[in-house]
Image (spheres, helix red, strand yellow):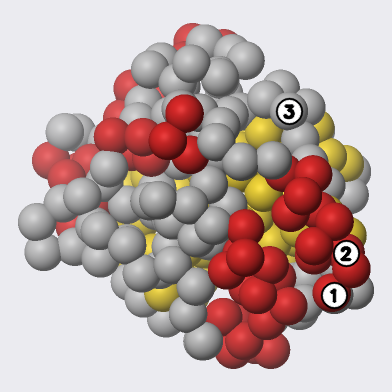
Amino acid sequence: MPELTFLGHASFLLEDGDKEKLLFDPYISENPAAPVGVDDLKANYILVSHGHADHLGDAHKIAQDNNATVVSSAEIARQAQGNGLNAHAQHLGGRHSYPFGSVKLTLAFHGAGIPGGHACGFVVDYYGKNIYFAGDTALFGDMKLIGELDSLDIALLPIGDNFTMGQEDAAIAASFLQAKIVIPYHYNTWPLIETDPQEFKKKVESETDSQVVVLDPGEKYTF
């Protein structure tokens, strides 16, 4: 069965036994909440939402060590290729097939962290399960379309405020997306983004049909 492991901040590992392993925004070596080291991680694909240091993170080293493919916007993919790494470029609205299923790049309203780029999120079809990773983003109305176009099993949403949505806006995002499971991230890494995920859980579950699963760094969710 597929497992999603929270690696702290905005980093997740998606895996299912010997099948392809996907890493999202692997900010590990400088992440005070990371439960593992960079050398402990194995991946076939590394999905990078934007070029800020707490999201691009250790993507290049992990890609080099594992001969993994970086999947991201054209600018970030080009940067990875310039460093001798495997990369596949996509852009907003585009979907591409992979051995595990597919990846579609979605809008995200945030800084790109790289000249000429654009932040993004991902809808990943992983062996028939749809996982939406919002990246760093503000609330935006077209999240309704994301939920309508792809029936979501899991939505991963930032809740820490200041740099991304806070709890109130993230709860509205959950109502738009209508995923079966919502998992919060991008909070409590530093004092500036401290918030109580249990309050988010209460709000979402009282206002939507979604269940919120709060993971501590290192914890897994099996689905």
Location of residue 143 with respect to 156 vertically, above or below: below
* Kind of residue at disc 2: Glu
Q: Where residue 139 sits in the image (x, y, percent)? A: 49, 73
Q: CA distance from mark 3 to mark 2?
A: 19 Å
Residue 169 image label = none
Helix, strand, or loop for circle 2?
helix
Circle 3/circle 2 CB separation < 8 Å: no
Residue that appears at 57% across and 68% down = 169
Residue in the image at 89% along x and 68% along y: 206
Q: Nearer the viewer, residue 188 or 93?
A: 188
Which residue was labeled with disc 2? 205
For the residue pair 26 and 216, the one nearer the viewer reads as 216
What amino acid is labelled 3 in the image? Asp
Separation of residues labelled 3 and 1 (CA atoms)? 23 Å
Which residue is labeled 1 in the image? 208
Label 3: few (<14), some (14–19) or many (≥20) C-alpha neighbours in 10 Å: some
